[in-house]
Image (tube, grey):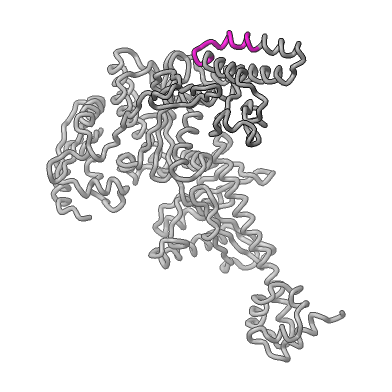
Amino acid sequence: MDNPRLDYLRDKVKKLPMQPGIYLMHDKKGQIIYIGKAKLLKNRVSSYFRNVEKHTPKVYRMVENVWDFEYIVTSSEFEALVLECSFIKQHSPKYNILLKDDKGYHYIRIGAGDYGKITASHQPQKDGARYLGPYLSGYVVKQTVDEVNKAFLLPTCTRNFPQEIGKQRPCLNYHIKQCMAPCSGKISAQEYSEALEEAVNFLKGASGNIQKVLTQKMMQASESLQFEKAARYRDRIRAIQGLQENQKVVSIRYEEEDVIALVQYAVKCCAVVLQFRNYRLVDKEYFMLDEMTEFSEEALISKESTSQGEAMENVLREMRTQFVLRYYNMKGSVPKSVVLDGESSCREELQEYLSQKAGRSVQLLVPQKGDQMKLLKMAKENASQQIAEQTKRTSREISALDELARLLGLHQVPNYIEAYDISNIGSETIVAGMVVFESGRPLKGAYRKFSVKSVVGKPDDYASMREVITRRLERYHLHKEEGVGFGRLPDLILLDGGRGHVAAVKPIVEQMGFSIPVFGMAKDDRHRTRTIATEDGELSVSSFRSAFDLLTSIQDEVHRFSITYSRAKHQSNAMDSALRSVEGIGEKRAKNLFIRFRTLKAMEAATLEQLEETPGMSRMAALNLYQYLHKGK
């Protein structure tokens, strides 16, 4: 690291007290670039200046720019929490997570003319259209517009009416009963205008009256034998009723509440806040936290005595605390209850701080089941979707990796996973397959095959797995400069097997100086992943649906890959044995024949000249082989 002040900073750290407080990092110009709190100042600040090369990229850059630091001792961790929050708001340091409230006003636009459309808009324009609003939540405006258009079967396409009526066939929305299709020419301007006005009245809160009016119109159309028209009214009534049911799904028993969930993927993290007011969802906000930043360092200070599970949980607890502090510092108002997807690093102090800020009691809730867990799941799905949009991955893949990290207690999301399976047909053909999943998807170019060499005679899965893992990790030292294939270390090793496999392999990994998490995948009677095996026991995956699906995919893929190689190897050995029984064909010639023809059937179809053209073959050896293959025919 190019920081000439490191020795000075390390010496200064030795004089810090083992007390709570805040610390302020300064750059060469004296500007504050980072502010943090600590339960024990000496431990926390010293972590920045030791093992510098192991820091996350953002922390590394911050430490590279630290010229000096100062600190303020406090009487309690709560006091440090309040002081840190105040200083961050005052100085806005470069390397702290800073949340921006860039919300503007939003409107619902009702287009002018006989065939106006309902759309979301940021600003009202002088275009003859009507505007409803303003609304604070762009999320709610977009959701409302989408739902009302579906409920009243209004078009959302880019076609202009009446100019394009009859020029094109109705689109998919018409066939799935989400649009009345004015483009078909069967909907009059008057009928369309009625539907549009009903939608506008619904937006203004007259849902009950609209259903009564539509019911009357449906009955009148039916009595007049206008069954197609009556069916359109019926579909509209059902859609409105469905819309009201959907609104009930996101209602809660609490008058006002915020639901907060964090989802991590690689070095990115997304925090989503669902705001409920008057028992209804009124807004959704998300914030991208580009890196795990300082939280990883905080959690891993005592990594010699902290398990990976504890480290991961410490990271998430600290992230929740910092996010909640900075979010409500930015917002100003605090609801009566805040629901979190896990514990925070200092729950009592955080709850006291929020209560003081609100001027009344605020509850911090961490539900384990029930309706609020469903709301947390909704928040997590939204966070996964936001990350997916930025990383070109599906939200399902993001959720699966996030769940897997939490299930296994890893301090980072396992973006690069290697899985191993031993396969044998008898005692002569023992092989292993290694498959790789990167970002939740198979990376087939990184798959590898192993022929087990040290196990002779009776098959021994444990010894075979030890040999394979040893050889794989030894290859890392030979290829690490390349950074791909064997030159890249996995974030996680999964073994097709139970506790015995983990107990056999994990010590090998540790003895070779690697700190790679190792787990087993145990199957049930239907050959599906039943549990995750550790050295100490088993972890149930039944409540982690996305992680379960990912693990099942990995286990199925590694089994398919290893058994396919095992069968090919067995076939090769059988062919080799048969070929070497022919006079004039030894190991080298047999190998060349297999490479060229792959199967005995292909050799049988070959001419004598084609057999002779195989590298290393003589005329006599080819003739002997030809006669052997066609013996008795």
Which of these two is toward me, 318 or 228?
228
Q: Picture quarter containing residue 19?
A: top left
The residue sitting at 70% across, 88% down in the picture is 584
**Residue 122, percent across and down?**
39, 27
In percent of width and height, residue 6 lies at 17, 51
Q: Where's the N terminus, which quadrant?
A: bottom left
Q: Is 386 or 312 nearer to us in this picture?
A: 386
Q: Is residue 630 above or below residue 145?
A: below
Q: Position of residue 574 (x, y in %)?
A: 71, 72
Estimate the x, y position of residue 343 in percent, counting from the top left: 40, 29
Q: Quadrant of residue 103?
A: top left
Residue at position x 70%, y 86% from top? 612
**What range is drawn magenta here?**
202-214
Instruction: Specify whether 83 is left or right of 574.
Output: left
Q: Is residue 159 visible?
A: yes
User: Among all residues in the image, which is located at the extreme front?
Assistant: 163
